[in-house]
Structures are given as structure tokens and as C-alpha cells.
Image (cartoon, helix red, strand yellow):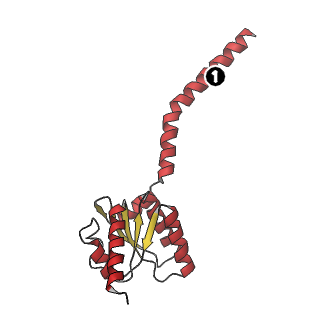
Amino acid sequence: MLERSKKNELIDSLKGDIDKANAVFLTNLIGIQSNDAVAIRKKVRDAGGKIVITRNTLFEIAGKGTKCASLLKDLKGPSAVALAFDDAAAVAKVLKKSGEDLEPVTLKGGVLGEQVLSIDEVNELADLPSRDEMLGTLLATFMAPVSALARVLHAVGEKKNEAVE
């Protein structure tokens, strides 16, 4: 059993992480092998997030007064909280993919910014392309007119050269 000072330290740390996070997702990692749990934690960390597992009452206390108060209130059963500090879609994608591969891992809801998300909305967020993919698409969209112009100018130049010869 944790001492009161350790509990308070954990609550303060969790509350600080919730305040810094762009998104918070409620999930479950209980019932999977430790190697799988470590792999999921690593993937979430690589996506710019963090997974915390502790008692439901500590989640509820840490959530009071934050954007996640309603999400972390009256939790039942085993729970874990995934925090996304950078790309919320990437963390949601990791959790969704893990749920497809490992049956016990389930998404239970989330908070994005100040908005509480249902399970369906979290799944939709997970289906979005990653931030890097979206930036690549945007860059390609910006570059398309310039590339087309360059091809046309190159073709005109070649036709001119052919006509001179």
C-alpha cells in the first residue's frame, strides 16, 4: 500500500501531466502479457505520449478540477490513462491498433483539448492520418501548381530547341 506522501506525489504528477497533455485517452492494459504492455508503452512514448496505470480513486482525485474530471470520475474495473503531449491522433492510433491486435486492450473514451470524446469519436481520431502525413499532403498540394508550371516551361523549352535544330 502506498504511503500518503507517495499518493500525493503521484496525484500531483498525474494532474500536471493532464494539464500539459493535448489529449487524454482512457484505456486498459490489464490482461495482456508484460512484453506486450512494454511494447505498447514504447509505441505511445514514440508517438509523444505516456501511459499511466494506477488506482481508479487516484485517477479520480487527480482529475478533479481538470478538463478530464468527467472522464476520470467513477471509474470501474482496470483502467489506464494515455496522455498525448504532441500528436493526439498518433497516440489514439497506437491504442486502436493495439486493441485490434490484443483483445483486452480497449478504448473507453477520451478528452481532446476541452472536448470529451466518445469511444466512436476516439476511433475516428485514430483513423486520421498522422501529423507528418497531413503535412506531407499539404506540402504536395502547395507544390502541385509549381511543379505543373515547371513541367510546362520545360516542355516549351524542349519544343523551342527542337524547332531551332
Residue 157 to residue 92: above or below = above
Task: Pinpoint residue 154: horizontal percent, then vertical percent.
Answer: 63, 22
Q: Which residue is farthest right?
A: 165
Q: Which residue is farthest bottom?
A: 1
Mark 1 residue type = His
In depth, the one of 1 and 136 nearer the eye is 1
Visible residue check, residue 156: yes
Density class for disc 1 (Cα within 10 Å; few <14, some 14-19, many ≥20) is few
Q: Which residue is found at the position 53% from the left and 29% from the top?
A: 146
In depth, the one of 115 and 82 nearer the eye is 82
Q: Which residue lies under the disc numbered 1?
A: 154
Name the quarter where the N terminus is drawn.
bottom left
Looking at the image, residue 161 sits to the left or right of residue 32; the answer is: right
Looking at the image, residue 83 sits to the left or right of residue 4; the answer is: right
In depth, the one of 9 and 27 nearer the eye is 9
Name the quarter where the C terminus is drawn.
top right
Task: Pinpoint residue 77: horizontal percent, then vertical percent.
Answer: 36, 83
Residue 151 to residue 84: above or below = above
Task: Pinpoint residue 123: horizontal percent, then vertical percent.
Answer: 41, 63
Under circle 1, the secondary element is: helix
